[in-house]
Each structure stands twice: as structure tokens, then as C-alpha cells.
Amino acid sequence: METIARYLMLAGIALFLTGGGVYLAAKFGIPLGRLPGDIRIEGENGSFYFPVTSSILVSVILTVVVNIVAKLLKK
């Protein structure tokens, strides 16, 4: 039961950090979700949205950050 609690706490911390990053991106005017290449289709009965460019940008940034942290921890 302790391992489940640890995983839940780590997931909560990850969600908190993600929310903080999105909040800071909005405060600094970074238009995540509104970049060129993001797909938005709006019709009469509904809409579809897929942030292709935003997803790629976030993926690249997270890859760089994780690699830097991993290199710092190996020293």
C-alpha cells in the first residue's frame, strides 16, 4: 500500500508542476495551443482540436530538461 501512495504523490507533484508550467507560459505570453500547425476544426455540431505543434514543442523542451537533469545526477 505504501508504494501506491508514493506513486500517487509523485503523480500529484507532476500534475502540480505541469499546471505551474502552463500557468507561467500563459503569464509570459507563450501561445501554447494557438501556434501555427495546431489543428482546429469547428463545425455546427461540435469542434475538434489537436495541438500538433504545441505537443512537439513541449516534447522537445521536456526532453532537453530531462537529459540535463539526468546528466547532473550522474556526476
Image (cartoon, rainbow, N blue to C red):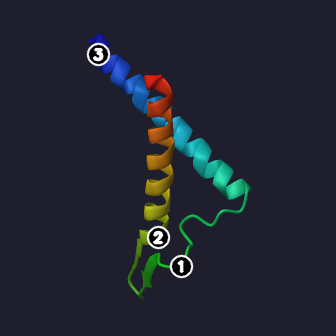
Name the residue rendered at 44%, 32% in the picture: 70
Residue at the image position 51 percent from the left and 43 percent from the top: 65
Disc 1: which residue = 36
| Residue 66 or residue 27, whichever sits in front | 66
Q: Residue at left 34%, top 24%?
A: 7
Numbered disc in front, either 1 or 3: 1
- Residue displayed at 39% across by 79% down: 46
Q: Residue furthest top?
A: 2
Label 1 vs 3, first from the N-terminus = 3
Looking at the rendered structure, the number of numbered marks drawn on it comes to 3
* Badge 2 amino acid: Thr
Cα distance in 3D space between marks 1 and 3: 42 Å
Instruction: Reply above or below: 75 against 43.
Output: above
Q: Amino acid at mark 1?
A: Pro
For the residues labelled 2 and 1, say whether their Cβ atoms are less than 8 Å apart. yes
| Coordinates of residue 37 in the picture (x, y in percent) | 47, 78
Q: Farthest residue in the left direction?
A: 1
Contact, mark 3 vs mark 2 (Cβ under 8 Å): no
Q: Amino acid at mark 3?
A: Thr
Residue matched to label 2: 53
- Left/right placement of residue 68 relative to residue 2 reads right
Pinpoint residue 19: horizontal percent, then vertical percent: 56, 44
Separation of residues labelled 2 and 1 (CA atoms): 7 Å
Looking at the image, the residue that sits furthest to the front is: 75
Along the viewing direction, whichever of 47 and 71 lies nearer the viewer: 71
